[in-house]
Amino acid sequence: MEMYFKRYELLNPPPDREERNLSQGEAEQFIKKLYEELNYRYMPEREGRIKKLLEEIKSFAELFRIDIDICRMETDIEARLYFRYLFSWRGSLKDDLIALLGKCDEIKIETDKNGEYDYILVLKIATHAMYRGERRIFPAE
């Protein structure tokens, strides 16, 4: 039996050249400036695709009895899949999930603060494109 092991040493991040804590006002100014440079543009061409994808996500959750929340935000739609007692993805669950992940713009895995679920899979679908000036940042074209 052949095995391969490799561990990476955690590196300490380099110290900041200018260590300082931002005051509440400075932090608000920074965030305000950041958002002034960004603008969002609605993508109506995605509506049909988004509707179909949401139906697929709902069918997936129903088929595998996964708790789900779907929320429409200002610039995207977020589907949260709450997994219980699922330690591995196999068979058709794996295949169906991989197909869904490939159609989403962003994914992340969160832990459940209340401990009711093993983990939460968050799928995001953009309804608006994010631009800095005329350069499109998100989602990729």
Image (cartoon, rainbow, N blue to C red):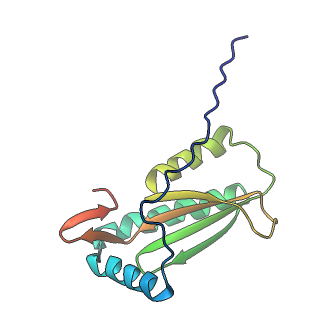
Residue situated in front as seen by the camera: 102 or 31: 31
Q: Say which of 34 and 110 sits in front.
A: 34
What residue occupies the far top of the structure in this picture?
Answer: 1
Up-down relation of residue 139 to residue 72 (above or below): above
Residue that sits furthest to the bottom in the current view: 25
Instruction: Look at the picture and state if 104 lies above or below 129.
Output: above
Tell me which residue sits at (46%, 59%) in the image: 16
Task: State which quarter of the image contains the N terminus.
Answer: top right
Q: Is residue 86 left or right of residue 75?
A: right
Residue 44: x and y in percent read 29, 73
Q: Nearer the viewer, residue 77 or 61?
A: 77
- Image quadrant holding the C terminus, namely bottom left
Image label count: 0
Q: Residue at x 72, y 42 (%)?
A: 88
Q: Residue at x 48, y 67 (%)?
A: 19
- Residue positioned most to the left: 134
Give the x, y percent position of residue 4: 65, 19
Q: Position of residue 51 (x, y in %)?
A: 44, 68
Give me the residue at 37% from left, 67% from top: 48
Give the image location of residue 92, x and y in percent.
64, 42
Horizontal side of 100 relative to 32 (left or right) equals right
